[in-house]
Structure formats: structure tokens, C-alpha cells
Image: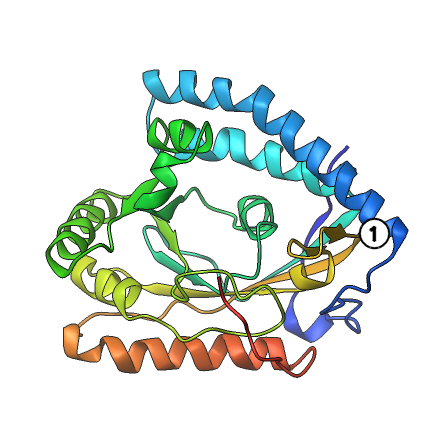
Amino acid sequence: MSSTVVPTPPSRQRPSLVRTDLTPSFAHRAHFGWLLAVMGFFTATMSPCVVIHSAFKPGAKTFRTWMDPWARFILGMCGIRLRVDVRVAVPEPVVFVSNHQNSMDVPVLSAGIPVPFVFGAKKSLRSWPFVGWVLERTACLFIDRSGPKKALASLQECAERIRGGASVLLFPEGGRSWRHGLLPFMRGPFVLAIESGVPVVPVAIIGNAGVLDEKGLYSSSGEVRLVLGEPISTEGMTRRDAVALSERVEAWIRAEMEAVAPLVPASGE
């Protein structure tokens, strides 16, 4: 069983069925239990496969080989329909920059982005039981934000990977918003794109707050929309342009979200 990924030209979009919040109920609490069971089962059974495969053939393509079916199984078995709107063909490599609502973002992005990529993750995830073990042995890039020098070294390492042909996805908010809103953007992902000399592709996730409430322990079937904007060239840019680039991407993501429903204040992690 799998989710349905439907590329939708803007001129043919139908009225949105996306919800932006979730009402507590017994059915939604039961669905959350089912979601945890599904995610736990497929993560436990497929993680060893991706680790072994990555040991022989590391890289984003191997990571995608396993993440794509993992994500589609989860979305399909939990009744979450994914609608993907890719405005133009995505070049490679790029830096994808996405808003971050909750844990459902990972399967949505894994199933929806049409090219191989790796996730940029906080270094603290490396110490998480099992999850950190899997991420460390696959194509994940860890970002150390514990100090300016360590952050710079992490960005330089990521830039080398990107210049070598690996696209990376980063969350500029630095944490989950938990709802249909945005946290302030950090400039790191945009500095990375400029230093790497690759385009930035803005990504808007709309509706994950309407199918999952991690804090309330509720979830539901429903529709989620993933929008990939036009790549923004960083040619000729310097670090001084990172703030303006960040503001441009944030404004685009905000507009895509507000086209569905007004934003609400984000609480953050």
C-alpha cells in the first residue's frame, strides 16, 4: 500500500482539502497509536537494510532507494494523501530549504522530493538511541551548532559534499513549529548554499499540522501538500547576501502557506 504522489501544475490545482489543525478525539488518539506502530515497524525492519546497503554504496541515491518506499508505506497505511507541486524541474545539486512542522515532515519530504538528497541534522541527533546509529551510517550530514568555529567547520564539510554532487535538505527554523506557522529563519543554510555555489530550492510543507499533533498525541488521515519552488541562483552572491536570500525564501514559503490558511504563532521546540 502506498501514498499517491500527484505532480500538480499550478494552473490545474483544485481547491485545497488540507487541514491546518487537528481536533482532539478518541479516533485521533487511536490513529496516533496506529501511526506509531506503522512507523516503528517499517523503521525497525528497513533501517538495517539501508545501513548495510550504505556500507557498500554510500550516498544520496542509496539513501533514497530505501527512504522513498519507507515513506510511502507510512503515508499510505496511515491514510495520508500527498499532493506534490513541482513548479520547475529540479537541477542537481541544490540546497533544499523547507519549513519544519513536526515529525511527519521526514516521510513527506522523502516521498515528495523527486531527486536524491540527504538530510542535514543537528549533531545532537547522533546521540539518540538507534536513530543516531542509523543516521551516522547513512547519508545524513550532521551540523554542529555548539559554537561558531564548530558550526563553520560543519558548514565547510557540508559544502564539500554538495560540491561533490550531493543535494542536501535543511530546516532554517532550527526546530519544529508544531503548527501552521513559521519560526524565525537562521542564515546558516543560505550561507552554505552561497559557499557551495549551488541554487536554493524553497520547499513548503502545508498540512502536516492537520494530520499530526505530537504534543497532544493525536493524528489523523488527511491531505498534505508539498510545494517545490523555482531554484534561486546564488551565482555572484557573498555571505553578505545570506540575510536577503533568507528573507526571500521565507517570504515565498509564507505566501504558499497563507494561500491555504492564515498562519498562527509558532511555539517552537
Residue 20 versus residue 195: which sits nearer the camera? 20
Write down the residue under mark 1.
28
Q: Does residue 73 show up?
A: no
Q: Residue at x 65, y 72 (%)?
A: 10
* Extreme-front residue of the structure: 216
Q: Give the answer, above or below, for where 111 lies relative to 200.
A: above
Position in image of residue 146 (x %, y %): 22, 54
User: Left or right: 267 with respect to 262?
Assistant: left
Position in image of residue 76 (x %, y %): 75, 40
Residue 12 versus residue 98: which sits nearer the camera? 98
User: Left or right: 10 with respect to 162?
Assistant: right
Q: Does residue 72 show up?
A: yes
Circle 1 sits in a helix, a strand or a loop, which is it?
Answer: helix
Position in image of residue 230 (x %, y %): 45, 69
User: Left or right: 251 with respect to 238?
Assistant: right
Position in image of residue 144 (x %, y %): 24, 50
Count neighbours of disc 1 (C-alpha within 10 A) and say few if under 14, some if 14 to 19, many if 20 or more: many
Q: Dividing the image into 4 quarters, which one contains the N terminus?
A: top right
Amino acid identity at mark 1: His
Q: Residue at x 36, y 47 (%)?
A: 121
Colour setup of the view: rainbow
Res 12 quadrant in image: bottom right
Q: Residue at x 77, y 71 (%)?
A: 16
User: Left or right: 149 with respect to 72?
Assistant: left
